[in-house]
Each structure stands twice: as structure tokens, then as C-alpha cells.
Amino acid sequence: MEEERKSFSDHLRLWFKWVTDPLGAFFNRLGIHPNTMTILGVLGTGLGAFMIARGNMLWGGLFILISVPFDALDGTMARLRGEANEWGAFVDSVADRYSELVTYAGLLYYYLDKGNRLACILVFLSAAGSVLVSYVKARAESLDLYAKGGLLTRVERYIVLAPALVFNQPLIALWILAILTNVTAFQRIYIVRKDAYRKHFISNGEKHA
């Protein structure tokens, strides 16, 4: 099997391990459960989405920037406690989807109120692409197929969106996300196709050996 490439998120966890490990250990000493940290991240993002819906892009972006690191800390805390398991990973993944979708909901409400149809379409395309990027990976892995990679994983999507909100330029981010999230989904579909055919040929080769 080909060597698995590290994603940008994987590299970030390695680069900032010197920060996340001490912080994770500190929160563990306070008695905070990793899943609680996950929920706090969702609540922080929800507060950011509320600010966005009200048109306060600066505070919405800041709340999202503050909430995103919780995604790294919950996993770090579970690892340090020796409690990393499938349930924790499942909760984390579901929470990530809710965090993203509630952010898009805030943007959708804001642009519906403004009567900006084009922006609403961009929000829909961005949300659809983001969900599909995650779904393709989840569905592929359920079939034991490789599906990592692509331009905009979750971290990259927030790197595009959060600063644009802080500087009150959400439309720029939405154009980028509407296009590149869907490009990323198709990239992953292609990666899955390659892995499926590779395994098919290996399997046929073994049968005729």
C-alpha cells in the first residue's frame, strides 16, 4: 500500500505539539473532560455564528478563531489521559460538522436578511462542498478505502473564512470556499477511485496467482 501522506492538519498538530500538550495537560488537571472541550468549541462557534447573523463579522470571526483550537485540544487531552477511542473520535467528527454548518447558517441568515441572493447561493455551495469533503472521506473509510488529501480540509477552510470575517470580507471567503470545497470533494472522489481500482487489481492478481 502506498505511504499515507500527512495532511496540513496533521502537520499543524506536529508543529504546535509543544503548545497543545502542555495546555491539554493543564485542562486535564482542572478535571475537564475532552468531550466537554469539544462541546465548548461548538458553543463558541455557535456564538460566533450568532454574531455573524447580526452582522457583526469582527466578533463572529474572533469567536470562531478562539473556538477552532478546541478541536486540537480535545484530541490531545484524550491522548494524554490514555482515553483516545472510537467514541471520542466520533463525537469530535460530528461536532466539527455542526460547528461548520452553524457558521454557514449565520452567514445565510445575514444574507437572506440583506436580500443578497448570490451570497446565499455561495453559502449553500460552500456548505455543500464542506459536507461532501467530509462525507466522501467517511464513506470511503467505511469501505476501507483511502480518501485523505485535497486542497481545503477543515483547517484550511477556517483559515480562509475566519480572517475574512475579522476583516469584514466574507464574500471573498465564500467565493473561495464555494469553488474549492467542491474541487476538494472531487479530488477525494478521484483518490478513492484510484484506491478502489488498485485494490481490485491486487485482488484479481491474487486470485489468478
Image (spheres, rainbow, N blue to C red):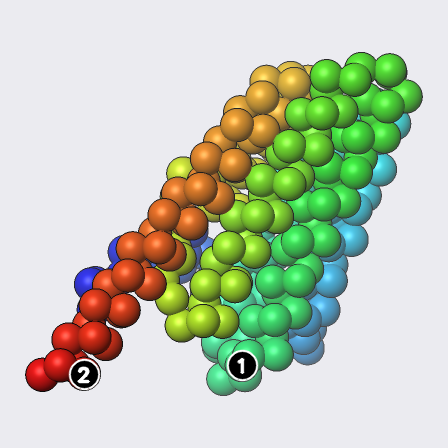
Residue 89 placement: quadrant = bottom right
Q: Disc 2 marks which amino acid?
A: Lys
Q: In this view, does 101 lie above or below 125?
A: below
The picture places residue 119, in percent across and down from the top left corner, at 72, 20
Q: In this view, does 68 lie above or below 88?
A: above
| Tag 2 secondary structure | helix
Q: Which image quadrant: the C terminus? A: bottom left
Q: Is residue 22 visible?
A: no
Specify the label residue 85 is tagged with. Answer: 1
The picture places residue 151, in percent across and down from the top left corner, at 40, 38
- Mark in front: 2 vs 1: 2
Residue 146 placement: quadrant = bottom left
Q: Name the residue located 46 percent from the left edge and 63 percent from the top edge.
A: 140
Q: Name the residue located 44 percent from the left edge and 42 percent from the top edge.
A: 186
| Labels 2 and 1 touching (C-beta < 8 A) | no
Q: Disc 1 marks which amino acid?
A: Asn
| Tag 1 secondary structure | loop
Q: Name the residue located 61 percent from the left edge and 79 percent from the top edge.
A: 87
* Residue situated furthest left in the rendering: 209
Q: Name the residue located 80 percent from the left edge and 35 percent from the top edge.
A: 106
Q: Name the residue under label 2.
A: 207
Specify the label residue 196 is tagged with. Answer: none
